[in-house]
């Protein structure tokens, strides 16, 4: 059910308005163009999740924020409805990621931090640590080297918390 502005003499949603889906209870409010969200808008899902940001012809495009029910949150860019470009994701358990996304996945350079203070800084491919990177442990030690499929792989350098280096 739609409530808002329409194109003069028609039922085409055009301008500011809100639409509640009778199928799934989704509420969409914002600016409409030719029956599609276009510009700044918000979408609330029955699950309690919601998105606030830019839409272009009904698709998330540009800067936006998506919040899941447990207050997990993504702040960043969207392209063709997916996380794309620079973004930051935070989870209610204390995990954080800041870096590049491609097609909804961590892909490119990024920084991932665990709740215990350990962090990985380096390359990601399709949500996995892949390529060159450094794991910094909260005790001050670190491993710098190559990662494959989320694990240390190949040559690298271990630096102990007292500064001792092992190649």
Image (spheres, rainbow, N blue to C red):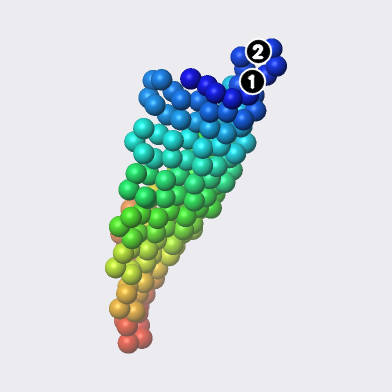
Q: Is residue 136 left or right of residue 4?
A: left
Q: How many marks?
A: 2
Label 1 sits on a secondary structure element that is strand
Vertical comparison of 39 with 111: above or below: above
Q: Residue furthest right?
A: 8
Frontmost residue, 73 versus 162: 73
User: Is residue 67 visible in this depiction of the protein?
Assistant: yes
The quadrant of the rendering that contains the C terminus is bottom left
Q: On residue 10, which mark appears?
A: 2
Q: Residue furthest front?
A: 3
Label 2 sits on a secondary structure element that is loop
Q: Residues within 10 Å of mark 2 (few under 14, many from 20)?
A: few
The picture places residue 145, in percent across and down from the top left corner, at: 39, 68
Task: Tell me the CA gap for discs 1 and 2.
Answer: 7 Å
Q: Which residue is mark 1?
A: 6
Vertical comparison of 85 with 26: above or below: below
Instruction: Tell me if label 1 and label 2 are in contact, CB under 8 Å.
Output: yes
Measuring 47% from the left and 55% from the top, which residue is drawn there?
88
The picture places residue 110, in percent across and down from the top left corner, at: 46, 59
Q: On residue 154, which mark appears?
A: none
Q: Is residue 157 left or right of residue 65?
A: left
Measuring 37% from the left and 63% from the top, which residue is drawn there?
113
Vertical comparison of 61 with 156: above or below: above
Q: Quadrant of residue 47?
A: top left
Q: Residues within 10 Å of mark 1 (few under 14, many from 20)?
A: some
Q: Quadrant of residue 50?
A: top left
Vertical comparison of 104 with 159: above or below: above
Measuring 49% from the left and 46% from the top, which residue is drawn there?
65
Frontmost residue, 61 versus 19: 19
The picture places residue 38, in percent across and down from the top left corner, at: 61, 32
Q: Residue furthest top?
A: 9
């Amino acid at each position: 059910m739609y409530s808002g502005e329409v194109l003069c003499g028609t039922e085409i949603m055009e301008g500011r308005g809100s639409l509640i889906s009778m199928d799934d209870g989704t509420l969409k409010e914002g600016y409409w163009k030719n029956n599609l969200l276009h510009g700044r808008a918000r979408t609330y899902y029955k699950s309690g999740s919601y998105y606030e940001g830019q839409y272009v012809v009904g698709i998330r495009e540009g800067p936006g924020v998506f919040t899941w029910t447990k207050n997990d949150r993504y702040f960043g860019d969207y392209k063709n409805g997916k996380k794309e470009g620079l973004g930051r994701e935070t989870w209610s358990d204390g995990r954080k990621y800041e870096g590049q996304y491609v097609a909804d996945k961590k892909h490119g350079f990024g920084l991932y931090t665990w709740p215990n203070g350990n962090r990985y800084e380096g390359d990601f491919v399709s949500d996995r640590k892949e390529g060159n990177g450094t794991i910094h442990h909260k005790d001050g030690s670190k491993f710098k080297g190559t990662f494959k499929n989320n694990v240390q792989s190949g040559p690298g350098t271990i630096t102990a918390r007292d500064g001792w280096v092992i190649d």
